[in-house]
Amino acid sequence: MSGPGPGRRPGPDDVRRLALALPRTKEVEAWAMPTFRVAGKMFLTMPDDQSSFAVRCPRLERGELIAAEPGKFWVPPHEAASNWVRARLAALDDMTELRDIVTDSWQQAAPPRLRETLVPPDPYGS
């Protein structure tokens, strides 16, 4: 499904829009790709062809997440020791799921006082 409303599949522009809608987020080019940081800490990257994105995910939770939805989440071998997981944009259910994933990663990187002020962005940009 496409278009601006509910049920629309997310794309790379949506990842960027939602990340930048979160407090004190800045986009920084690093390793020849866009990265998104809150208070200087990276919480999201858009690697490769922008068909996926990478977010923070505690390693103990990551294995369960990948086992539950292997078509949606994975970790490239060179990132196995990290606290990151990749998500395939085409596999996400909708914009709300994208918003929740991006927001969760932001919360892991944001300072505690900033987390207290969070109002999650509207997934559809209204």
Image (spheres, rainbow, N blue to C red):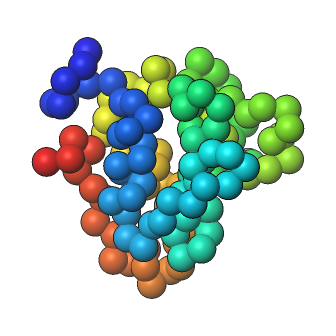
Horizontal side, residue 119 vs residue 86: left or right: left
Quadrant of the image containing the N terminus? top left
Q: Is residue 69 visible?
A: no
Percent position of residue 17, x then y: 35, 49
Percent position of residue 70, x then y: 63, 21
Q: Is residue 123 visible?
A: yes
Look at 62% across and 69% down and name the residue there. Answer: 41
Percent position of residue 84, x then y: 69, 47
Look at 61% across and 55% down and name the residue there. Answer: 29
Q: Where 114 sits versus 122, above or below? A: below
Q: Where 34 sits versus 78, above or below? A: below
- The part of the image, by quadrant, that contains residue 12 is top left
- Which residue is most to the top? 1
Q: Where 31 sits versus 114, above or below? A: above
Look at 16% across and 30% down and name the residue there. Answer: 5
Look at 57% across and 41% down and name the residue there. Answer: 46
Percent position of residue 33, x then y: 63, 45
Horizontal side, residue 10 vs residue 60: left or right: left
Q: Where 76 sits versus 28, above or below? A: above
- Which residue is most to the bottom? 113
Q: Number of numbered discs present?
A: 0
